[in-house]
Amino acid sequence: MSTQTWMLALAMALALSLAGCGDDSAPDEDNAPQAPVMLPNAVEASADEPAPELAPAEPQPLPFPTAPAPADEAQAPAAPAAETPAEPVDARAIDRSRPQAAVAAMAAAIDSGQADQFYAVAEVAPEQKPFYDALFDWFSAQREFDRAGRAAFGEQAWQAEFSGMGPSGLDSQAVETITATAAQMQLEQDGDQATLSNPDGGQVFHLVRRQGQWRVRPDAFLGTGTEQDIAPLKAMTQAFRQTAGKADDAGMTLPRFQQEFQMALQQAMMKALTAPEPPAAE
């Protein structure tokens, strides 16, 4: 499936999740629309195959090792109601002298949604930068949309429809867990080049060491992106920002806001996906 098809599926999933939300009935919290961050996974290709294209994505966790859920949640102590959430870790502050720590830094950078953190820990070729710029601008637009909605309609009403938009960062405990889990992966190192992989298959991380600090090559799990991949990302970014700017309009209600977003997303995506392809370079 082409990247364009994946992007259209994502747009339609977002739009359809908001369909029918304009009535006055009470929201069904069990079926409230969710908008998790979805990152494209790349399909590996051999030397005889064409360049990898982004595979169809479904809402999934990031491709980083995570901690298992508690075996018996009933035994876990309840967190104090007034406890302040842990501050997210800045990926740039993580010591990446070990490849395993670099994997955790990459996870923290992506989950922060901050492009400056990402570029500080990622090994990115110049031609890949436009795609990653567009990806992190999309993350930023999601957070702007979320802030605008919460401010305009209140936390309770917003939470009934959206569980949060955009990445929010990893705390120190999550970073330590990822680092410890990555330490169980198989490490193969050749000078300043290394790979981390699971013996039973799955995600492989390719790393490069620069000035004593390891960097992760993100193209294996985020893709590299062509102009055809960038256009739908920009379209979704436009829809988020266009709708966020209407949150404070006179008479705006949450159901109407949802409808505005649905229409903006559909229009932007259809325009991006039906645009003619750029002429091939001579």
Image (cartoon, grey):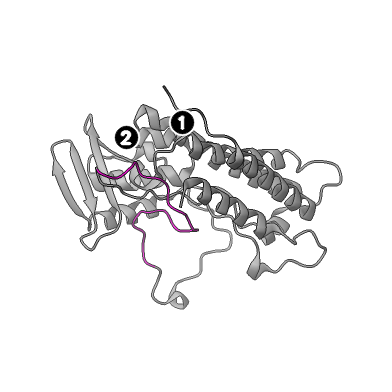
Percent of width and height locating residue 14:
62, 54
Dot 2 or dot 1, earlier in sequence: 2
Work out whether 147 lies above or below 71.
above
Q: Is residue 74 visible?
A: yes
Left or right of residue 50, residue 274 in this image: right
Q: Residues within 10 Å of mark 2 (few under 14, many from 20)?
A: some
Q: Quadrant of the C terminus?
A: top left
| Residue 265 horizontal side relative to residue 88, left or right | right
Q: Secondary structure at mark 2?
A: loop
Residue 51 belongs to the span the image colors magenta: yes
| Residue 100: image location, x then y, percent | 25, 48
Residue under numbered circle 1: 130
Q: Nearer the viewer, residue 93 or 102?
A: 102
Q: Which residues are magenta?
A: 48-68
Name of the residue lying farthest toward the top: 282
Q: Residue at x 64, y 44 (%)?
A: 270
Q: Residue at x 45, y 47 (%)?
A: 111
Instruction: Count numbered badges in the picture.
Output: 2
Amino acid residing under circle 1: Pro
| Residue depicted at x 75% and y 43% | 247
Residue 16 pos. (x, y %) = 66, 58
Closer-to-camera residue (3/87)? 3
User: Which label number is shown at residue 231?
Assistant: none
Question: What's the amino acid at mark 2?
Answer: Glu
Main SS, magenta region, reads loop
Q: Which residue in the structure is indicated by mark 2?
A: 123
Residue 88 visible within the image = no
**Cα distance, mark 2 to mark 1?**
14 Å
